[in-house]
Image (cartoon, rainbow, N blue to C red):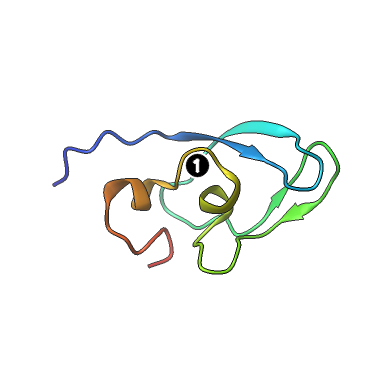
Amino acid sequence: MSNVQIEPRSTLTCPRCGHQATETMPTDACQYFYDCQGCGAVLKPKPGDCCVYCSYGDVACPPIQEGGGKGCCG
């Protein structure tokens, strides 16, 4: 069992309009899509990222934080 302190919240920044929103990340599922509350754009993970939090958040998803390297879908 890991002793890593997991940060459960991440602030997403929309690459289209710059709107920021702080959200609680799921720990048991990937979040592939996120609807921007500013412009309505549907955010999807960038190639090579496992979820929208790893692409647009200021904190990576919980599995990445734990150091598993597989991401939330791995």
Exactly how many numbered labels are in the figure?
1
Residue beneath disc 1: 25
Specify the quadrant that holds the C terminus.
bottom left
Question: Which residue is rendered at x = 54% and y = 48% of the image?
Answer: 53
Question: Which residue is rendered at x = 28% and y = 48% of the image?
Answer: 66
Residue 11 locus on image (x, y percent):
58, 34
Compared to 71, does 35 lie above or below?
A: above
Q: Is residue 22 left or right of residue 48?
A: right
Q: Residue furthest right?
A: 39
Q: Is residue 44 left or right of residue 50?
A: right
Name the amino acid, label 1.
Answer: Met
Residue 39 locus on image (x, y percent):
86, 42
Which of the two residues, 29 or 18, is positioned nearer the viewer here? 18
Residue 12 locus on image (x, y percent):
62, 39
Which of the two residues, 58 or 74, is positioned nearer the viewer here? 58
Which of the two residues, 46 or 74, is positioned nearer the viewer here? 46
Question: Which residue is rendered at x = 54% and y = 57% of the image?
Answer: 51
Q: Is residue 46 left or right of residue 9?
A: right
Question: Which residue is rendered at x = 33% and y = 36% of the image?
Answer: 6
Q: Secondary structure at mark 1?
A: loop
Q: Is residue 6 left or right of residue 56?
A: left
